[in-house]
Image: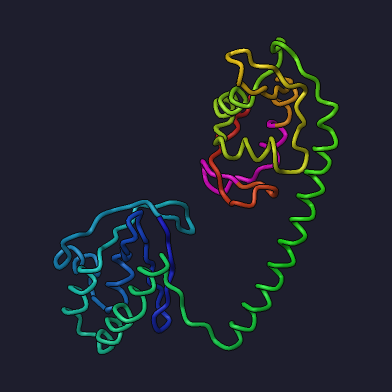
Amino acid sequence: MNLTPLNFSGAEIRVITDAQGEPWFVAKDVADLLEYSNPHEAVRTHCKGVREILIPSAGGDQMTKVMPERDVYRLIMRSKMPAAEAFEEWVVGEVLPSIRKTGSYQQPMTPGEQLLAQAQAVINVERQQAEQQVALARIETRVANVEQVRYLDSRPAGFESMTTIRERINLRHGIPPWVVNAVMRDIPGAPLPFAMVRSHADDGAQPYAIWPTADITRRFDRFVAECTFVTAERATHPDIQQGRFKLRQRTSA
């Protein structure tokens, strides 16, 4: 679900794009803009496809009534607001084509905004180049340590594989596998394997890496302590660039 706040003549219209790419308009926003004296009654009387969904707001996630495109037209046709026709042209001519093409409404940029966007693009390229240099240095360090990794015939007690780490950390903290992978492999402080264990399942089986269970527990406890909750079940971390991820709230002992 993608929430996009739009602006028509100074009035905010929130549009939610669902998983199928279909736009849903916040019912109250549309009814208020079209100057219905009783927005709730107008939506109840004229709209046929209204449903309630949970969307973020300043006070937290709230159940909000949204309407499909056809219900927006129903309210426009019955509105006495002089600008109703201009609003319809804006929705039909700009908003909907943009949403169906890109998944969100892209408002035209002013010359100043275009200049700022170009400058931001240059900054982004420079940042990507710097990040690539850091990543390359990290890879070189890890490669230099490969020769120090030992090979064992069996996994000793107190050590675990990557598969076990993903499952255990998810149970302990609710962290999804892709974040576990990032902590283990990509972000600063990613732990090197203690050893590689030879697999004897068949002649072509590949060795797998193992890490000390206690060290990994401490590593993820520290990672969680560095996270910032943005909702009851979503958090961010400075080293996770993909944005929010699922995380279980810590409970006091």
Q: How many marks?
A: 0
Q: Quadrant of residue 3?
A: bottom left
Q: Position of residue 161 (x, y in %)?
A: 65, 22
Q: Residue at x 52, y 47 (%)?
A: 231
Q: Residue at x 30, y 67 (%)?
A: 28
Which stretch did the figure color magenta? 220-235
In the rendered view, does 159 fall on the left or right side of 168?
right
Viewer-proximal residue among 158 and 59 = 158
In the rendered view, does 2 fall on the left or right side of 157?
left
Which of the image's four quarters has the N terminus? bottom left
- Does 9 sit above or below residue 193? below
Q: Is residue 10 magenta?
A: no
Q: Residue at x 82, y 48 (%)?
A: 137
Q: Quadrant of residue 182?
A: top right
Q: Position of residue 48 (x, y in %)?
A: 15, 61
Q: Position of residue 26 (x, y in %)?
A: 33, 64
Which of the image's four quarters has the C terminus? top right
**Outermost front residue:** 203
In the rendered view, does 215 fall on the left or right side of 56?
right
Q: Residue at x 46, y 78 (%)?
A: 107
Viewer-proximal residue among 222 and 117 = 117
- Does 205 sit above or below residue 177? above
Q: Position of residue 68 (x, y in %)?
A: 25, 64
- Does 184 sit above or below residue 135? above
Picture colour scheme: rainbow
